Image (cartoon, grey):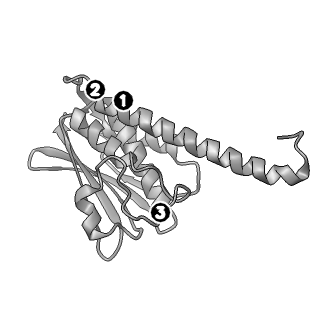
């Protein structure tokens, strides 16, 4: 790159962007493969959610994006820490990518009908209603207009689903009113 003549530098920059995109796609495929190939009995352990969320936020948020975590210090769930961390990291990255400029990203936790409910929500544009039933399918991207530059390859939410199911939990999503998107993780409380 340094030795290239000036007329070739733009082409080299384009090639580097393509290599970076391919590398990101391979990493997502590997994450998806790991998530779907978990042993049938994942070892679940009590996890203090606030600590795990704080670690994920420190690792994932490089920009000046407001994230509000409303989680009690003692709130714990039964899960595999790596799988839950991977799930929350994917959800936070998606929220930053699609709604980071639209207002704070909120993470909350509560108990509902004997389940621990963890919610990640944003104030972005949401997704088309007809995309909600298939949004967790591998390689599904809700808008065909999304390019690789504006979105991934459609594995992030599939990884979230696989990880949460391996933790014996469920995942769902919905659009918020008047705008925004919300993903809900339901796990066993510790």
Q: Which residue is mark 2?
A: 38
Is residue 129 among what the camera can see? yes
Crowding at label 2, few (<14), some or many (≥20) Cα neighbours within 10 Å?
some
Answer whether labels 1 and 3 touch (C-beta < 8 Å).
no
Point 82% across, 50% down: residue: 9
Q: Is 66 positioned to the left or the right of 138 in the image?
A: right
Q: Which residue is mark 3?
A: 146
Give coordinates of residue 54: x percent, y percent.
43, 42
Answer whether labels 2 and 1 touch (C-beta < 8 Å).
yes
Q: Is 137 positioned to the left or the right of 123 in the image?
A: left
Q: Which residue is mark 1?
A: 34
Is residue 67 among what the camera can see? no
Q: Earlier in the sequence, mark 3 or mark 2?
A: 2
Look at the picture and state if 107 lies above or below 124: above
Q: Is 76 positioned to the left or the right of 180 in the image?
A: left
Give coordinates of residue 166: x percent, y percent.
23, 33
Q: Nearer the viewer, residue 133 or 106?
A: 133
In terms of secondary structure, where does tag 2 sit? loop
């Amino acid at each position: 790159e340094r030795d290239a003549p000036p007329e070739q530098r733009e082409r080299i920059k384009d090639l580097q962007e393509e290599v970076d995109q391919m590398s990101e796609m391979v990493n997502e495929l590997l994450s998806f493969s790991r998530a779907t190939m978990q042993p049938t009995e994942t070892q679940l352990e009590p996890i203090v959610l606030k600590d795990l969320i704080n670690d994920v936020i420190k690792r994932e948020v490089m920009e000046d994006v407001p994230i509000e975590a409303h989680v009690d210090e003692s709130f714990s769930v039964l899960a595999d820490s790596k799988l839950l961390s991977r799930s929350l990291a994917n959800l936070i990255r998606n929220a930053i990518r699609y709604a980071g400029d639209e207002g704070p990203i909120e993470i909350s936790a509560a108990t509902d009908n004997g389940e621990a409910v963890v919610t990640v929500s944003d104030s972005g544009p949401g997704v088309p209603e007809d995309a909600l039933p298939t949004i967790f399918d591998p390689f599904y991207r809700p808008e065909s207009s999304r390019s690789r530059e504006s979105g991934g390859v459609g594995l992030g939410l599939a990884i979230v689903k696989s990880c949460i199911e391996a933790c014996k939990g469920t995942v769902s999503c919905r659009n918020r009113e008047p705008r925004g998107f919300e993903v809900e993780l339901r796990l066993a409380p510790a």
